[in-house]
Amino acid sequence: MLALALAAVVLLPVLIALAVCADEVVDRLTCGYAHWRERRLISRLNRAVDADKIAGRIDLAALDRTDRRPLEQLAADLRCLRRDRVGGTGPAVVWHSSVLEAYDERLRLACRALGITEHLAELTGIDRQLERVRVEAELDAAGLRLPAIRPGQHQRHS
């Protein structure tokens, strides 16, 4: 009986502390589990994707330049120019070629920012059009989405 009374006196403050701090204890356990799952997922992704090879293609020093256009701005410019290129409002050939030149320049800047090889400047005619399609696919694979636009279709922003 004395042992039971002694155990009650010793364990009662512990039980009260657990009751008062139960939410924090549960929070620490769940956060620890979530952190462990996140580290495990990152480890699996690193094994599945050769991250060093992808990171090696990107020139990190170029991203720190002050005169560099933000990638988000390049993406917005490309979407706008792509819409104008396909369903432009000006029928003049000069206007259309200016839009194409501006579009190709933004493609080159985006490729440079993401470490993608492009040959738009060296090509002409159908070869340049094919290179443009290839570069758009490479940018899409790198995560820069350029939705398909048909003449007369307005781009939806989502």
Image (cartoon, rainbow, N blue to C red):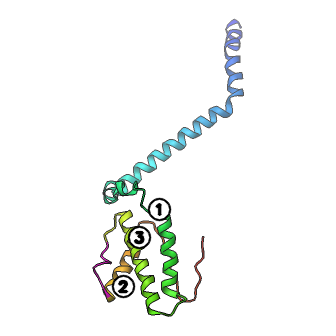
Other residues around mark 1 within 10 Å, as few (<14) / some (14–19) / many (≥20): few
Q: Which quadrant would residue 128 be assigned to in this image? A: bottom left
From the viewer's perspective, is the residue at label 2 or at label 3 nearer?
2
* Disc marking residue 70: 1
Other residues around mark 2 within 10 Å, as few (<14) / some (14–19) / many (≥20): few
The answer for how far apart the CA atoms under marks 1 and 2 are is 26 Å
Give the residue at mark 2.
129
Q: Tell me: residue 62, above or below residue 43.
A: below
Badge 3 element: helix
The N terminus lies in quadrant: top right
Residue 84 visible in the current orientation: yes
State the image coordinates of residue 149 (x, y, percent, origin top left): 52, 83
Q: Give the range drawn in magenta.
A: 118-124
Magenta: main secondary structure: loop
Task: Give the mark nearest the N terminus, 2 or 3.
Answer: 2
From the viewer's perspective, is the residue at label 1 or at label 3 nearer?
1
The residue located at (34%, 67%) in the rendering is 116
Q: Tell me: residue 17, above or below residue 136.
A: above
Other residues around mark 3 within 10 Å, as few (<14) / some (14–19) / many (≥20): many
Instruction: Give the amino acid type for the residue marked by disc 2 in the picture.
Output: Gln
